[in-house]
Amino acid sequence: MSVSFDNIINFRDVGKTVNDYLGRKIVREGVLYRSARPDEASPADRRKLKDELRIRTVVDLRTKTEHLKQAQKREADLAVPALLQSNEALAGPVQIPGLQYREIKVTGRPFERFLLSQLSWWSYFKFLFLFLSGYRMRAISLLGREVMQPRGLVGLGLITLDQSGGEIAKVRSSYFPLPFSPSPSPLLPTPIPITNTHRLTPQFLQTLITPSSPPVLLHCTQGKDRTGLLVALALMVLGVPTSAIEHDYLLSQAGLETEKEARLREISEIGLTAEWGDTPLDFVVRVQQHVETKYGGIAGYLDSIGFGSADQRKLIEVLGA
């Protein structure tokens, strides 16, 4: 089943994509979908997601900064009568009534602390000054230039694997008794302000195996790297051939082409260069190599982040054909 949308790009049924590529069914179709941000979905798009595809849960991997930027864009669009006339859904809520929404900041506190710990003392205090002074994007751009850019997109994916296990795997409390997170590292004693405390954060793999969740739509901003990493892990559990996982990941190159210029502007704003908008050919292979080398395989990795053998069997039951 091919589904087209007015305002949702990079959309696909992961199971159908893999099965069509392999010529045989090994992943259950109609259970896990992926896309870029669906915030501007038209009324027709919303009906397709809810009524045609019967999606129950939307898992959003974006950061607070990304949500703030998207809210600003939506507010600006509302001031343009032509845009409002072409998509009446802009005047309504971003979330589609009747669907469950799970916000999972996959690049969470441990990931942020690790990146901050890689800054020099001078850059760290500069970051802190900019962030606390309200210059959020300038602070993030500094982190992008000095920490993220040298490691590359694939390197950042491997850091995500190592630092974001809780966000990837299970339900855990994100409660902090004070309005500050713990120190990002022993070398950086100043606490970083955090938000959205005192809440229970539903995490991705646990969401997938919760009976009331599927079918699930997983997305970040582009639906490319964070989304691609989590989809790759799920497919690795099923024993999907590497070539098929790569095929699914690399489809994002063409899937995002219509927004390429806007995407490159967003990437530049956070201190990164144009290649961060591409899909690296070695992304999936290097993720698999890292998991094999450091954890002894996908089962070992999932065990290490608290998603044990019983949960892995449930995931296979949910996603396996």
Image (spheres, rainbow, N blue to C red):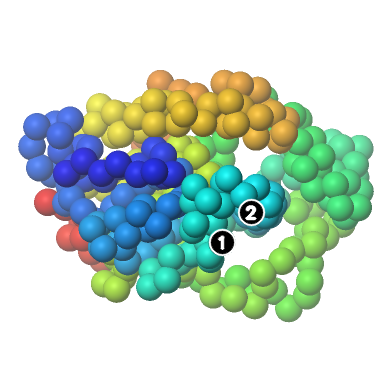
Q: Residue furthest left?
A: 24
Horizontally, residue 220 falls left or right of residue 316, namely: right
Per the image, the residue denoted by label 1 is 91
Q: CA distance from mark 1 to mark 2?
A: 7 Å
Horizontally, residue 181 falls left or right of residue 63, namely: right
> Which residue lies at the image location 18% right of the left edge and 50% below the top edge?
29
> Which residue lies at the image location 57% right of the left edge and 46% below the top edge?
83
* Nearer to us in this view, 164 or 294: 164
Quadrant in the picture for the N terminus: top left
Which amino acid lies under the numbered mark 2 shown in the image of this protein? Answer: Leu
Q: Are marks 1 and 2 in contact (CB under 8 Å)?
A: yes
> Which residue lies at the image location 69% right of the left edge and 42% below the top edge?
115
* Nearer to us in this view, 102 or 81: 81
Residue 78, visible in the rendered structure: yes
Which amino acid lies under the numbered mark 1 shown in the image of this protein? Answer: Ala
Per the image, the residue denoted by label 2 is 78
The answer to whether 175 is drawn above or below residue 221 in the figure is: below
* Nearer to us in this view, 78 or 123: 78
Element at label 1? helix
Image coordinates for residue 38, horizontal then vertical, percent = 46, 51
Horizontally, residue 80 falls left or right of residue 189, namely: left
Which label sits on residue 180?
none
Q: Quadrant of residue 14?
A: top left
Image coordinates for residue 294, horizontal then vertical, percent = 44, 39
> Which residue lies at the image location 56% right of the left edge and 52% below the top edge?
84
Q: How many marks?
A: 2
Of marks 1 and 2, which one's residue comes earlier in the chain? 2
* Nearer to us in this view, 258 or 281: 258
Please rate how many residues cluster around mark 1, counting C-alpha atoms within 10 Å: few if below 14, some from 14 to 19, many from 20.
few
Image coordinates for residue 57, horizontal then vertical, percent = 37, 64
